[in-house]
Image: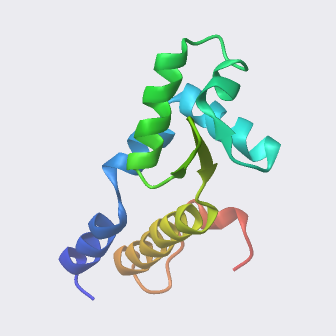
Amino acid sequence: MSKDLTTGHLGAVLSHQLFRALGDPTRVRLLDLIAERCRACSVSELADCLDVDLSVVSRHLTLLRAAGVLRATKSGRNVLYEIQFDSLAEALRGIADALERAREDFEPTGSRSSLDLEGPP
């Protein structure tokens, strides 16, 4: 496989929205809070756990939803947010697979990178 094609595969799975969504400590904390509860959570419930205004929490959740990390479901007057575990795992697995393919294409046959020196041959 050519280097250009590999880069294209990597570029196809790298989502700026996903990295933007996961690149903020407050958004990562929101995911952690939802995961700890093992259920969908409302904006107000999550805001009570953070030192952040409700409107800010709502914007963070909207960004996570747009990136495909969360699913929102209306329940009466509330919107409940839950982690889309399968799609998030699939996206991260796709990135890891593309990185593995890219590394294989860029390494000369038989050589090992400095990262591989710590592990078994």
Q: Which of the image's four quarters has the N terminus?
A: bottom left
Q: Which of the image's four quarters has the C terminus?
A: bottom right
Which residue is at the front of the view, 1 or 28? 28
Locate residue 44, reporting x and y percent: 63, 24
Using the image, determine if residue 29 lies above or below residue 48: below
For this orientation, the residue located farthest to the left is: 4
Residue at the location (58% across, 13% down)? 52
Residue at the location (67% across, 17% down)? 50
Locate residue 10, reporting x and y percent: 33, 68
For this orientation, the residue located farthest to the right is: 37
Using the image, determine if residue 26 lies above or below residue 96: above
Locate residue 111, reporting x and y percent: 49, 78
Is residue 120 found left or right of 69 in the rendered image? right
Which residue is at the front of the view, 76 or 118? 76
Using the image, determine if residue 20 lies above or below residue 51: below
For this orientation, the residue located farthest to the front is: 76
Is residue 43 found left or right of 105 in the rendered image? right
Residue at the location (38% across, 48% down)? 66
Name the image colouring.
Answer: rainbow
Using the image, determine if residue 53 lies above or below residue 77: above
Is residue 6 found left or right of 121 in the rendered image? left
Q: Quadrant of residue 81?
A: top right
Residue at the location (70% across, 27% down)? 45
Locate residue 64, reporting x and y percent: 47, 43
Which residue is at the front of the view, 36 or 41? 41
Q: How many marks?
A: 0
